[in-house]
Amino acid sequence: MKYTLAQKMNRSLRWLLAIGAVSAVCVHGMYLYEFGSWPIALSNDPAVWGQYGDYIGGLLNPIFSSLAFSGLVVTIVLQARQIDEGKHNAELEEMQRVQSTVAARIDQLLTSTVIADAGKYRELAQFAGNPQTVFQLISALGTMALSEPDKDHPDWGKWLWNDVSLEGLRAALDVQTVPLRLEFEALSFMLLRYEASSGSNDVMAFYRYRYAAVLTWLDALKLLTTHKQVQEFFQPYRLHETMNPKGR
């Protein structure tokens, strides 16, 4: 179980109080054992009470002083750690805000309209089924790049990827996705910084899950070969086989 700094401080202070209480009981017990009479009777002699006070004070004062100093040190150390942790959390929150901003731009680019000349658009439509958005274009061409052609499929003609058409389609998609890939590179940079700063695993897992499909399609189309930070954080190549629509 992981404790917060406040919980650690409370636990430390409780231990110090417990040690102080046990010390007081032990000192009184030793005095009664050595000098007390049974049954216990209170003396009327002020000198006896003075000796008792000197004994108790002489033993407990150093102990309580040490415990008080220890408590002060523990409090100062934990407060310093709390300040450092607060700064660290503020940095992580700032990183998360930047990540959210970049992710919003990525989503906007994915839903943007495909821009291509009439001839190139007809070629894209032949393979990608009249894509209206960049996401639809990436999805269609990426799925085909991952697929294993089936000669018995009624749309077998769509699977004939010769070098000329493939390079032409990839070039068209390359131009369409330059801003998108740059944003993914920026997001990967921030997520790698976030990971190095011991950020939340849930946040990193969320972004990996959120963009797994898009990045796997782009990687299958060989459009992420120069994006080292995207490869390092998202590792899209690992999902190629998982997203391969076999038997189509």
Image: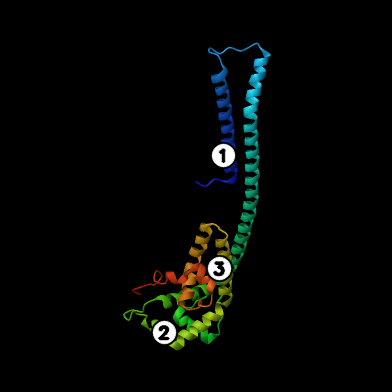
The residue at which mark 3 appears reads as 188
Does the CB distance between marks 1 and 3 fall below 8 Å? Answer: no
Q: Where residue 50 sits: x, y (%)?
A: 67, 19
Q: According to the image, label 2 marks what residue? A: 161
Q: Amino acid at mark 2?
A: Trp
Residue 194 appears in the figure: yes
Type of amino acid at the residue the image marks with label 3 = Ser
- The residue under the point 43% across, 69% down is 238
**Most foreground residue, 181 or 8:** 8
Q: Secondary structure at mark 1?
A: helix
Reply above or below: 187 against 85: below
Mark 1 or 3, which is nearer the eye?
A: 1
Residue 68 falls in image quadrant: top right
Residue sitting at x 68%, y 14%: 46
**On the image, numbered disc 1 is attached to which residue?**
11
Q: Nearer the viewer, mark 3 or mark 2?
A: 3
* Distance between the alpha carbons at the discs numbered 1 and 2: 68 Å
Q: In terms of sequence position, does the residue under pointer 1 or pointer 3 come before the other?
A: 1
Q: How far apart are the two marked residues, 3 and 2, measured between alpha carbons?
A: 31 Å
Total marks drawn?
A: 3
Is 2 in front, or is 190? 2
Q: Choose mark 1 or mark 2, whichever is in front.
A: 1
User: Residue 56 at what x, y percent from top left?
Assistant: 63, 24
Residue visible at 56% across and 16% down in the picture: 36
Q: Is residue 240 above or below residue 197?
A: below
Residue 133 visible, this orientation = no
- Report the amino acid beneath label 1: Arg
N-term-proximal mark, 3 vs 2: 2
Q: Is residue 149 left or right of residue 10?
A: left
